[in-house]
Amino acid sequence: MSLLFHSTAARLPVWRSLFAADGEPLIEGEDAVTDPAGVTAIACWVPPADLSRYPNLRAVISVGAGVDHLPPLPDGVALSRTLAPGIEAMVRDWVVMATLMLHRDMPAYLEQARAGDWCSHPVRLASSRRVGILGMGRIGALAAESLQSLGFEVAGLSRSERTGAVPIFAASQIDAFLARSDLLVCLLPLTPETRGILNAKTLSALPRGAGLIHAGRGAHLDPEALRAALDDGQISAAMLDVTDPEPLPQGHWMWRDPRVIVTPHVGANTDAAEGARHALAVMRALRDGTPLPGLVDRARGY
Ligand code: GLV
């Protein structure tokens, strides 16, 4: 019963030492597999192409928070996504930074700074701005708490019933939720229901001049709808950490438009030790027959 490491070389030394400290065997890459029947779990971003090679495979672990990039898995193979406080805190930090940047007109000031233009815009209190968080999972809840502590009036929208520090709108109340979101944050997982959710209709349901902060997945957003909304003044600016495709092609209008700031999917990068600890917890659960940490419901998509 062993875990096959199929992640980045940079993470390997940390995984090696944490697995050794726990007495848990680690197979260091597909080339090191001597007995495919001994592989119980695979930790990866994208799994090896031929999983039928591993007849006793019981789990694939995504070394990241998202799972939308993974192909369908053979029957009986569970999917676990890495639960790590570090990933959640990193994305929270990016969201807080991006929200503050839009709140404090940084896209305009960056453009002015390049032109040496000393010109001020009205400064507003955070408490005068309503932030709406689409997707109130672990990261959404963390971001909501931090933004609320900065004074923003925060609400979330969630498909599942949730209670928490901020008001939560149900999916059926999306219009009311959008209508009160001066700054819209997208942290949704990518599923068939959420693909393309940031479209002309949703953007037009926001208050005029709203800002968009997007750290979900590129395929949530219709870039042409964003461009039209920016040109029309419906959206004032956007901060995007995700695009479709990634990398965003050179010369794409979103790179050049001063109202849009793109960062290259850097919201979070799974810390090697956190990833290894999650994988060790999955191996323990497989041995003990207890529920897998981070178990993904593939029908739901997260
Ligand atoms: C990054 O986007 C991740 O899913 O971990």
Image (tube, rainbow, N blue to C red):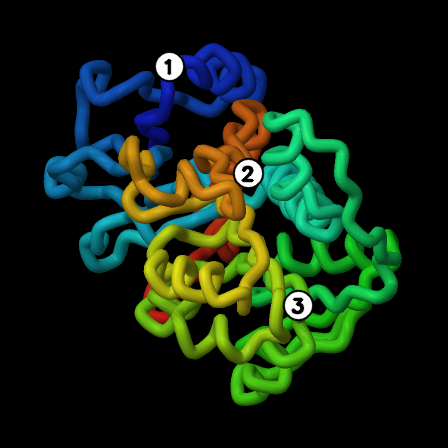
The residue tagged with tag 2: helix, strand or loop?
Answer: loop
Q: Nearer the viewer, mark 2 or mark 3?
A: 3
Q: Nearer the viewer, mark 3 or mark 1?
A: 3
> Considering only vertical position in the picture, is 13 above or below 227?
above
The residue tagged with tag 3: helix, strand or loop?
Answer: strand
- Real-space CA distance between mark 3 and mark 1, rounded to the nearest whole angstrom: 38 Å
Going 34% across and 34% down the picture, which residue do you hit? 44
Q: Is mark 3 within 8 Å of ligand 1?
A: no
In the rendered image, residue 155, in percent from the top left (x then y), is placed at 72, 71
Q: Amino acid at mark 3?
A: Gly
Q: Is residue 128 visible?
A: yes
Going 43% across and 15% down the picture, which residue do you hit? 12
Which numbered disc covers residue 132? 3
Q: Amino acid at mark 1?
A: Ala
- Real-space CA distance between mark 1 and mark 2, rounded to the nearest whole angstrom: 21 Å
Going 26% across and 57% down the picture, which residue do you hit? 76
Q: Nearer the viewer, mark 1 or mark 2?
A: 2
